[in-house]
Amino acid sequence: MVRMFCMAAAWLCLALVPLRAAPEENARAVLERAVEAAGGEAWLNPTTLYLAGHAVFYAPDSATPRSTADDYRMWRAMNPNRTTAHGADGKVRITARSGDRLMFEVGYDGTTTWTEKGVMPKDQADAYWASNFGFGIIREALGTGFTLERAPDRDVGGHPIALIRVISPDGATTLFGIDRQSHYIRYMGFVTPRGFHERYYDDFIRLPSGWVQAREVTLYYNGVKANTVYWRDVKVGEPIDPAFFEPPSSPDTKPT
């Protein structure tokens, strides 16, 4: 009986000893693995990016889709020295169409933000881009002036991820979730004028250049789904006339 009691006591002592956590991989190492997995230099330094597909938009007070853009496109001209995480940067143009109907269009030519309705006032433009721009800052995050921190890890869509915090020189904080197995970027989150914004990335493909693209991107604000974009076509580094990002003279203006 005494022997059994001693054995039970020994097992209890072992159970109460805190388990030693595995050594934590620092934030920079996590990001370096993500860059390598995403395509390395080809992914870090794109000059332009073109994406085309379709998008489903949701109303905040309904469980069913509000509208669908069967033709959804984005053109980007990148700024290789970006330091602002959540502001307009480089050049961008986005169009959403349903059949022959233009649902909306928005662009930024490096100075002016515009929509299909005309030039957007600066205060509105700043709030708009602050609620939407954020992913590209990760390409600059290994550079001077950025702070990288670890955050508690989590699961995203059943995938364990390492969570890192990127603090840009302008003081903005962005969370990025890196898949523990593939090292692809599966998650992003940051505070916006619309609330806490999250993006979930899935359905990854690798181009011949090595560039890895998520073909499914779902956006949330304050935990509510806003839209999902399904990219079909991806082109990286192809020339785009800078004039294409200026307010168009006609709705049929095309890139050259």
Image: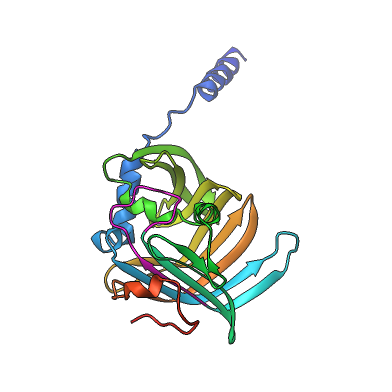
Between 253 and 86, the residue placed more toward the observer is 253
**Residue 141: image x %, image y %?**
33, 47
Judge whether residue 73 is colored magenta. Answer: yes
Q: Is residue 54 above or below residue 223?
A: below
Identify which residue is drawn at 40% across, 54% down. Answer: 181
**Which image quadrant: the N terminus?**
top right
**Residue 228: image x %, image y %?**
57, 66
Let me know if residue 11 appears in the view: yes
Between 39 and 113, the residue placed more toward the observer is 113
Magenta residues span: 72-89
Q: Is residue 234 above or below residue 179?
A: below
Q: Magenta stretch: dominant SS?
A: loop
Residue 179 shown left or right of residue 206 in the figure: right
Judge whether residue 154 is colored magenta. Answer: no
What colour scheme governs how the chains and residues are painted in the rendered image of this protein?
rainbow
**Residue 214: image x %, image y %?**
44, 66
**Residue 170: image x %, image y %?**
39, 41
Let me know if residue 235 appears in the view: no
Q: Is residue 214 above or below residue 145?
A: below
Q: Quadrant of residue 149?
A: top left
Q: Is residue 122 above or below residue 207?
A: above
Q: Quadrant of residue 45?
A: bottom left
Between 115 and 11, the residue placed more toward the observer is 115
**Which image quadrant: the C terminus?**
bottom left
Identify which residue is drawn at 53% across, 62% down. Answer: 120
Residue 15 shown left or right of residue 33 in the figure: right
